[in-house]
Amino acid sequence: MPRNGSSDDETKPAVRAADALAAYVAKRDFSKTREPPAGKAKRRKKGDPPIFVVQKHAATRLHWDFRLEMNGVLASWAVTKGPSLDPADKRLAVHTEDHPLDYAGFEGTIPKGQYGGGTVMLWDGGTWELLEGDDPVAQVEKGKLDVLLHGQRMNGRWALVRMGGRRAADKGKDNWLLLKKKDDHARPGDGDWLVTQHMTSAVTDRPMDVIAAEEGEAPPPPPKPKTARRKAAASDAPPPFVAPQLATREARAPAGGAWLHEIKFDGYRMIGRLHGGKASLLTRTGKDWTTRFKALAEALAALPADGLMVDGEIVVLDDAGASDFGLLQEAIGEARTDAIVFQLFDCVFLDGEDLRDRPLVERKERLRSLLEDADLPEDALLRYSDHIDGAGPRVWEKACSMSLEGVVSKRRDAPYRSGRGRDWVKSKCIERQEFVVGGFTAPTTGGPGLGALAVGYYDAHGALTYAGKVGTGYTEAVAKKLRARLDKAQRKTSPFVTGGAASERGIRWVTPELVAEIEYAAWTREGILRHAAFKGLREDKDPREVVLESPAETPPDVGFAETTETPPVDDPADPPPPPKAKMAKAKTNPPEYRGVRITSPERVVYPSQGLTKGQLAEYMDLVADRMLPFVANRPLGLVRCPEGRGDSCFFQRHPGMGLAKSVASVPVEEKGKRKAHVMVTDAAGLIGLAQSGVMEIHPWGARADDLAHPDVMILDLDPDPAVPFDRVKEAAREVKQRLADLGLDSLVKTTGGKGLHVVVPLLQRRNDWAEVKGFSQKLARQMAADDPDTYVAVMTKAKRTGRIYVDYLRNGHGSTAIAPYSTRSREGAPVAAPIAWDELARLPSGARWTVETLPARLKRLKAHPWAGYWDLKQSLTRKALKAVGLG
């Protein structure tokens, strides 16, 4: 982009792009740098909005390069502290040489010694609009550029202002200020939020150090060559014992390139130590189990290392190659240790070098090289546990589809730290954990066998808490062995301090010395295990260490049976394509639905699920024809989250602010003035909402052709968190019956939250807002008066404790309610879904279906749950109004 204050060939606004890039070319040796050369200037399709890109650049000084497409090139400013969301901040932006359009896709390293040497991250990108003037080049010459950004991280109104105006450029000084204008995206007093919250690439999700390592700036050192074994020295000795690093439970594997993922093994955690040709095997608590597994110890001793400490898990593999804890128990019990293998996944010490402070990827590479040097056969007792970079949610889904136990995800650049932390997280496919055995029952037929185990766990105060009985999973031989051990440990009193064990009959109490691995389906509200099965005893666990495991964020419904219709999952045997390949695909072939192109489809919008913007658009395309009758040609309220769930979400009613062109508008009377409201008229409009980062759609209850008369009434049943969902279902049935008594048919839908909506079509449109709101208010108050212990008709939170709020306020002029099939900006990616009344009994929650599970439901349905909706030509009759006290 030509600008004032430079050489003659740069001062003419109409100069060709190739000439404008002369300074860029002169500063670079393209035989040494991988930056894109300045070839023939790229001209994009006429009508395409210009792009912008922000590249975080760790050169001599860290800065953010802000680049705007204009006149066939990228006009560029170096922002020293990064963009600020505080309108009061004025960030220095030094105007630099123009860059070719190809530079918008560059992420990697510039070699040291070359101009701008250092690491470059694609930190943000999108499209932009000029808000003042018609010619951006002319505006730059004037020294003021007002723009509207539609990016992944930078959005809304921004301004670039030259310090000193036009005169400064004439004197060769080209320092500017980057300013955030006041709008819904601004964060007064929190200007650094953008640069502190977003530390990874917007395209590949890699932090700067990983980009540097993977792109050649700082490759990990190669493993030490092993030419010959040498005599061990005292300095080669690893520590006597290192407590293992432990994983924190999560609902699903995390997304992003900062993580690598390993299959979770179903065995005993083990630390292997080698020094002076002697190997030992230590449990997670430091117990020496070497004599139990002599063959594994001998294999460890044969490795080409003088001092070594490795972390892994001993397992027995079934015919499909999956680890099986039951088979491990049998192998140990029958002394068939030749069937046991040691899966190695970390190396914390090697040949005198403590590796605990090294990044995980380096430790694993050193371990892999060590095992390759050993030239082990495929069926060796020692095996390297490989991993997959990124794609965590897909790896987790694939593991679950293969009936594996789960996935362990680890931060690739993190050190090794003993104890439980968040650098390692585990996400299980099935509910399974250890429990302490505190009692048992005899079989109903009598005899020496076993009826069930009474199990529990220790709470935060050290009290053994009862968790229920486990009556399945035992072979006859196992039951007899367990009974023999339990008979010797019997005591007169219950070891359980809390829970309902005291009320159980027939339990014989034992000293809590044994730890059992239990698989189960779920928990009851009383804290008792459901459908629990015994998997084996854990000899490596201290009973006092057994606490309740629960994920940090548990989705309301895992729904594996219904995820089979989701897009194919990558095979864990085949790692996903590297980040650069993903980036190229996204840039050259963006997905398109209903004629709307989806930009940045790889952006993760539901972090815990790893769901992307592209997948959200794909879901919207799937449900568009079903949703459209309930949202088309109505004013809409939108929840927009341009950066994904939980980040800078805001509510929007009015058009503009970066909404896609396929989104329409409708004039609405507001306080005596007519203002445009967002509206969609077709499926392309719905896809446009997804393209614009909309995560919730809330339509009015009236159509644009008659905004004074609603065509639907909604009773929102909003329970206090302590209210069981069964009571909410009963409330919905009661509303249905009360409406039927007044001659009104109704339907029901889930909300994607904790409640339900009872929906009453009023397709005759004879009632105005006052009548509809008044009727619903009277009905809600009647329910609260008839059963004040169950219902409340006021919003006050203090009065809603333990009750269901019957919310009638969805029925006022300008009020909205979540649309059928709309997503929610909540954990788990739940959706609102119409259901048939006869489905209500089986419904487990108001968040039953998600973006991932609803497609399978729709495929199975033979008819729409609301079949007949548009035949309900009803209204609030005078008789019905009078029955509730109106008219």
Image (cartoon, grey):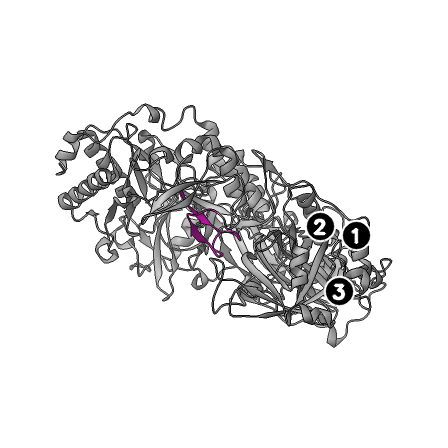
Kindly state the secondary structure of the residue where label 3 is placed.
loop
Q: Identify the residue under disc 3.
A: 218
Residue 347 visible at all: no
Judged left or right of residue 713, residue 367 is right
Residue 680 spot, x, y in % from top left: 46, 37
Q: Which residues are magenta?
A: 636-655
As measured in the structure, the alpha-carbon distance from the residue carrying label 3 to the one carrying label 2 is 18 Å
Q: How many marks?
A: 3
Res 611 label: none
Q: Is residue 635 above or below residue 876?
A: below
Q: Is residue 644 magenta?
A: yes
Residue 293 spot, x, y in % from top left: 63, 56
For discs 1 and 2, the disc positioned in front in the rendered view: 1
Judged left or right of residue 713, residue 376 is right
As measured in the structure, the alpha-carbon distance from the residue carrying label 1 to the one carrying label 2 is 31 Å
As measured in the structure, the alpha-carbon distance from the residue carrying label 1 to the one carrying label 3 is 38 Å
Res 580 label: 2
Q: Amino acid at mark 2?
A: Lys
Judged left or right of residue 373, residue 728 is left
Kindly state the secondary structure of the residue where label 2 is placed.
helix
Query: Which residue corresponds to the image point at 59% horizontal and 61% vertical from the top-left?
Result: 289
Q: Amino acid at mark 1?
A: Arg
Query: How packed is label 2: few (under 14 Cα within 10 Å), some, or many (20 or more)?
Result: some
Q: Amino acid at mark 3?
A: Ala
Query: How packed is label 3: few (under 14 Cα within 10 Å), some, or many (20 or more)?
Result: few
Q: Identify the residue under disc 1.
A: 16
